[in-house]
Amino acid sequence: MQEWTQLWLSYRPVKAYERADFFAEYTLEGFEAEHPVIRNALRELTLGIGSMLGVKPESAVKKTPAGGLRIRRDTSIGSEGYSLKAEGDGITLAAPDEKGVLYGIFHLLRLVSMKADIASLDVLTEPENPLRMLNHWDNLDGSIERGYSGRSFFFREGKILVNDRIRDYARLIGSIGINGVVINNVNVKGDATDLITDRYFPELQKMAEIFSGYGIRLFLSLNFASPMELGGCGTCDPLDPEVVTWWERRIRTVYKALPSLGGFLVKADSEGRPGPFTYGRNQAQGANMLADVLKPYGGLVIWRCFVYNCTQDWRDRITDRARAGYDNFCSLDGAFRDNVILQIKNGPVDFQIREPVSPLFGGMEHTNQMLEVQIAQEYTGQQIDLCYLMPMFREVLDFHTCCRDEKDTVADIISGRTFGNTNMGIAAVCNTGDDKNWTGNDLAAANLYGFGRLAWDMSLSSAEIAEEWIRQTFDLSPESERMLRDMLLRSREVYEKYTCPLGIGWMVNPLDHYGPSVDGYEYSRWGTYHRSDHLGLGVDRTDKGTGYAQQYRETNAAMYNDPHTCPEELLLFFHRVLYETRLKSGKTLIQHIYDSHFEGASEAKEMAECWEKLRLELDPEVYERVRERFRRQIRNAEEWRDQVNSYFYRKSGIPDEKGRRIY
Ligand code: GCW
């Protein structure tokens, strides 16, 4: 029995493919067949084409092939890019480097697996984001923080695993263009602190080698307090010479063992993790100290901006967690070394189903920045509920920050187009684990696939990505493909409808973050309040409230500040609104809450019914696995509907106009 699936790389036979002859032979010009990346690319070509078309691509080095696949070096193409062109009886794949060849081969395999016609193929593509990363929150004991797909395939009981699954993981993510992976949780504790010691170097070397064969650089999360925890220093003050010397020695040893290491991801001064604040230093002083130490080795410091006060008093209405990222970082714009990248969550709070875009995008002009999104569905249904996230990511990427007259979107900024920075990109908190199907819910793999594709090409639409993924993953009739695509495309909105209204967020069960608990965080220290009472709800983040809206550039600040121009889906994020206030739909706020919750729960049921229609076309195991998740989603949606509606009915005393059942 197969221990794990191959997701979109399953290479099912493609019948009657007209262009099988294109793949019978290949030539390689300007590349060494023995280069690890080329070797893997050719191995993949042989595997994929053999399995899909029953043809074994032969090397034609010594002959002059009439057609076939011609792979050649072309340094006029941007790094990691490639072109594919159908010419005569064959195809030319041109690339500037080995990685371009690998990506070009995966592109061809994708086209064949989608049964696309390649006779007039003519593509030139270069990745928009220099860094396209996955962040795993895997712990050394094998658990995964916010993991919904089993246990870690990197770690078990304090040991690093290096096996065939790691290779398949590298193939899968290499095929969608991922070029950097952080394997351990940003909360670095216990054994994980030792990852920068010889205790783990031999396995890390093997892992880095497998990764680099697929164009991927290994990164590690780092414990800022290592000088104290490992080195016996009395401090980890970034300006203390003893601390700097300790880091210099340690990093020298690390790079001696792991010369290809990309660098480190750091969560400092956040949710109890140590950082420069303890010593009265700012975030730039902390990050720059590490950056200087890493500089000689070409290492990067990816420094997270998730820095906020997590011991707030709920009575305090002045402190606003949404403000924290900007308050802690924006004034430091320009103060960071060029090998520091600030990694910024898409929203100002924490990966909710609906948040505005972080005002740090467009706020900082002289600092390398990466966007951080979360495909691990912590707050978006935990890979039980269907929630295809590309529509959300598209909204973030397309958001106009108004920092310039043109090229002002988040996509422009993170790709370096706006300010000309080079160390830029995008990262996702990953949704994988050692479950047979990698992502728990088979449909959640669309988020992994989609993230990689979008990171490469930010002009792809959510629908295009869904279609590609479906075609490569399943074997469905065109009508069923469309139905599944439509399910994916509407799923985020459905989830939003039955959970938190109009951008208010939270209302989840504390700790595990699945299912409703409207007041779960209302009287806690986490700074995530909805402030509901008998008259209304929402947080006043305008100039009369916490002033968060003023962190945006002028046009956006004015738009958010006024409830009439604030996008309605974010209304309660920015404004306190009374239950009887009319929305643009003409409905009152309270009626909107009732209606959207009834709708969301019934749409969840509809999606489950759609899935059931696909039964005969699906592998029974996949069908059952997803069906079981839909059953749980329906229960979850009903629970959300009833708890949220009852809560607001009890607070407001206003009945549902349609007289539906509220408890
Ligand atoms: O949303 C919170 C999660 C934590 C996580 C943190 C972070 C890794 O609940 O589990 O810690 O975000 O992003 O650092």
Image: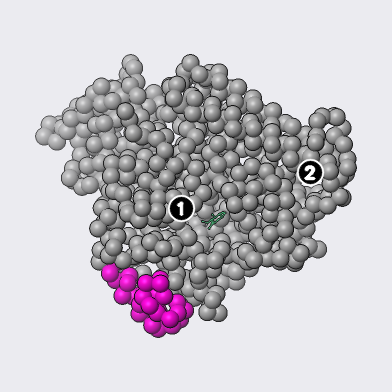
Expressed as whole percent of the image width and height from the top left, the position of residue 357 reads 62, 53
Is residue 653 or residue 547 the one in the foreground?
653
- The x, y position of residue 331, in whole percent, is 60, 71
Q: Is mark 1 within 8 Å of ligand 1?
A: yes
Q: Extreme bottom residue here?
A: 241
First along the sequence among labels 1 and 2? 1
Residue beneath the point at 31% across and 24% down = 52
Please report the residue visible at 77 percent of the width from the left and 52 percent of the height from the top: 538
- The tag on residue 647 is 2
| Ligand 1 in which quarter | bottom right
Q: Is residue 377 left or right of residue 316?
A: left
Q: Is residue 160 above or below residue 258?
A: above
Mark whose residue sits in front, 1 or 2 = 2
The stretch in magenta equals 226-254
Q: Nearer the viewer, residue 14 or 622?
A: 622
Residue 165, position in %: x, y?
32, 41
Q: Secondary structure at mark 1?
A: loop
Q: Please state the total of marks drawn on the protein image.
A: 2
Q: Is residue 105 above or below residue 528?
A: above
